[in-house]
Amino acid sequence: MKKAPRIRICPECGVPRRISKENLWLNNGKIVERKNPAHRMIFIENDSITGVFRTIEEIIGVSIERIIVESQRKLSYDYVSHFVPGLIIKLVRLTHIDISSRSTALQGQLMGFGDIEIIGKRLRGDEGDFMKLGVRDAWFPAALAGIAAGALEALIGKDCTATYEETSPGYHEFTTTISAREKEFEERLPLPQYSNKPGDIELGRCGRCGGPGALRDFEWKIGPGVIVNRKSGQRMVVSGPGEHETIFNELEKELGEDITRVAAEAQRRFVKNGPFTAEDTRDLEGFRTRLALRGLGNLREMEWKGDRLRLRLENPCMHPILIGLAHGLFELASGGEGEVNWEAAGDGDLTVEVSPKG
Ligand SMILES: [Zn+2]
C-alpha cells in the first residue's frame, strides 16, 4: 500500500499549512501566490471549470481537448522554465536525476488535482524516453496532460507530447513521450493582466495559521488529492484563472465563436447545481465574501432595479464564469428566463446586467 504523505495541517481550520502559506487571500477579491503576487489564483468548484469546458463542447459540437492540452503545455513550459532555478534545470538535463519528485506530486494533491503517482519512466536522453503518471480522480485530465508535458519540456529541454486514457473507472494514465529533438522555439501564450484596485473585504482569519477562517468549511483529503466543500459536498480545486482564460482565448482564435457568450451559457447551466443560491442576489456582503474566498473579484455593487439585476465587480477574473453566474442566479431568483449583457471597462471593472427575456 502507498504511504499517505506526511503533511502539516493547521489544527484549527484543517487547511494544509503549505496552502495558506503559499497563497494570499487579499482584501480586494484576489488570491495571489505569496512568492509571485503577479500570479493570480482561484479556489473554485471543480465543475465550474471542467463542467464549463464540457458544456462548451456540447454547445459547439466539436472536441476542444487538443486546444486544452496544447495551451496548458505551453503555459506549463513557460511557468516551469521561469520559476525553477536554471541550475536545477541544468542538473536535471545533465544527470537525469529523479525529476519525478514526490514533492511535485504532493503539491498537486494539496491543490485538489487527484492522487498522483509515477508509474513508469525511461530517461536515457534518446528516442523512446517517456514518463508515465497514474492519477486517481484526476480533476481535469486534458489540462493535467498538458501540464505534465510542458513541465517535462522545461526540465529536459526536449519536445514532449502527452496522451491519456481512463484505464479503469476513475483512474487515468498519462503518458508523456519525450522526443530526441531539442525543444523548438515557440511563441509564448500571453497570460491576462488583472486590475488591482484596493479593497476592504473582511474575510476573517484563522487564529492559528492566518488563512481565511471560512476555509474550515472545506475538507482537504490529502491522500486522495481531493478538496470537498463540507456543506455542498462539491469538489474544489486551487488553480490559476489565467490558465483557463488562455483556453478561452485559444478557443476563440481557433473557432471564431463568441466564446465568452458560449462559456457564460455553460456556466449558467451549472448554476442550479452550484454553491450559490437565489438569496445571494439579495445579500451583497455575503455574496461578496463568497466570491472573494474563491478569488473571483470584489463585488462592489449589486442591486435589483425593478425586475433587472445589475452587478459591478472590481478586479474580476474569468469573465464567462461571472457573467454566467449572474445570469443563472437571476433566473433562479426570478423564476423566468433572463437576457444577459455585460461590459468590461478599461479599468478592469466588469458590469453585468440581466433583464427578463422580452
Ligand atoms: Zn488555520
Image (cartoon, rainbow, N blue to C red):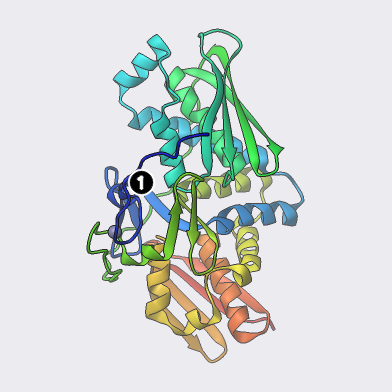
Residue 39 lies left or right of residue 172; in this view the side is: left
Residue 353 position, x and y percent, is 53, 76
Three-letter code for the amino acid on which mark 1 is drawn: His
State whether residue 297 appears in this view: no
Residue 49 vs residue 335: left or right? left
The quadrant in which the C terminus is found is bottom right
Describe the element under mark 1 as helix, strand or loop: loop
Can you name the residue that lies furthest to the front here?
Answer: 1
Q: Compared with residue 301, is residue 47 higher up or lower down, i.e. above or below?
A: above
At horizontal 72% and vertical 44% (from top left) the residue drawn is: 63
Q: Is residue 347 left or right of residue 168?
A: left
Residue 133 location (% of width, % of height): 56, 30
Residue 52 seen in the current view? yes
Image vertical order of residue 278 relative to residue 210, above or below? below
Residue 292 picture location, percent across and down? 38, 65
**Image spot of residue 262 (x, y percent):** 65, 59
Name which residue lies at 71% across and 51% down.
57
73 or 148, nearer to the observer: 148
Of the pair 13 and 62, the residue shown nearer to us = 13
Residue furthest to the right in view is: 61
Q: Nearer the viewer, residue 262 or 130?
A: 130
Q: Please tell me how crowded label 1 is: few (under 14), some (14-19), or many (20+) other residues with Cα within 10 Å.
A: some
Count the numbered circles shown. 1
| 307 with respect to 99 (left or right) | right
Task: Report ligand 1 position as a quadrant.
Answer: bottom left
The residue positioned 60% from the left and 69% from the top of the image is: 271
Image quadrant where residue 317 sits: bottom left
Position of 182 relative to 147 (above/below): above
Q: Which residue is mark 1?
A: 39
